[in-house]
Amino acid sequence: MALAEVNEQIKNCRKCRLWQDAKQAVPGEGPDNAKLMLVGQNPGAEEDNTGKPFIGRAGKFLNKVLAKNDIRREEVFVTNIVKHLSPENRKPLPDEIEACAPYLETQIKAVQPEIVVLMGKVAWLAPRVEGVTYMETYHPSAAMRFTKMKKRFEDDFNRLKKLL
Ligand code: SF4
């Protein structure tokens, strides 16, 4: 399935309860042939307002780490394992993750990235597609707050740069 088609399905999805409290779905953003895909947990308030992924504080921190490693964000496909905002920004529930994860799998199959970076424990639950290399790191919102996590996050992106 083409990326545009799955993104359209996401925009109209009612498979779990999350769409009810959200303004819109945030399918993801980036080239449909990106070599690198970044996956977070789910959209926050700013993402919900705009329909764009990772544009709040965590997104700005992520942009800085990408830039430091000469990775151009415009060349990366950025998305989340769950495509709608959660009420009061709570973690998505297991049934919501289960309902939404097949969209991510379809997106990975459409984009065919070489590497998928799963950011944060919820993203670590993402479906694995054969032939794709997966890397697990912390979520940028945790990495920007805790020194130890920040170091590991920055080291992981430094390692990633060498793999691309
Ligand atoms: S979070 Fe995912 S499964 Fe739930 S309604 Fe939104 S797109 Fe559908």
Image: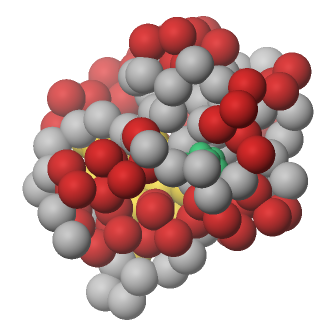
Q: Identify the residue shown where x is 86% and y is 21%.
A: 88
Q: Identify the residue shown where x is 55% and y is 76%.
A: 127
In the rendered image, residue 85, in percent from the top left (x then y), is placed at: 67, 30
Q: Nearer the viewer, residue 21 or 74?
A: 21
Q: How is the image coloured?
A: secondary structure
Q: Identify the residue shown where x is 30% and y is 35%.
A: 29
Judged left or right of residue 64, residue 150 is right
Q: Is residue 134 above or below residue 16?
A: below
Judged left or right of residue 117, residue 109 is left
Q: How many marks?
A: 0
Quadrant in the picture for the N terminus: bottom left
Furthest residue in direction bottom, as rendered: 130
Judged left or right of residue 131, residue 65 is right
Q: Nearer the viewer, residue 106 or 20?
A: 20
Q: Is residue 131 above or below residue 53?
A: below
In the rendered image, residue 86, in percent from the top left (x then y), is placed at: 76, 32
Q: Nearer the viewer, residue 15 or 149?
A: 15
Can residue 42 be seen in the rendering of this structure?
A: yes
Q: Nearer the viewer, residue 95 or 62?
A: 95
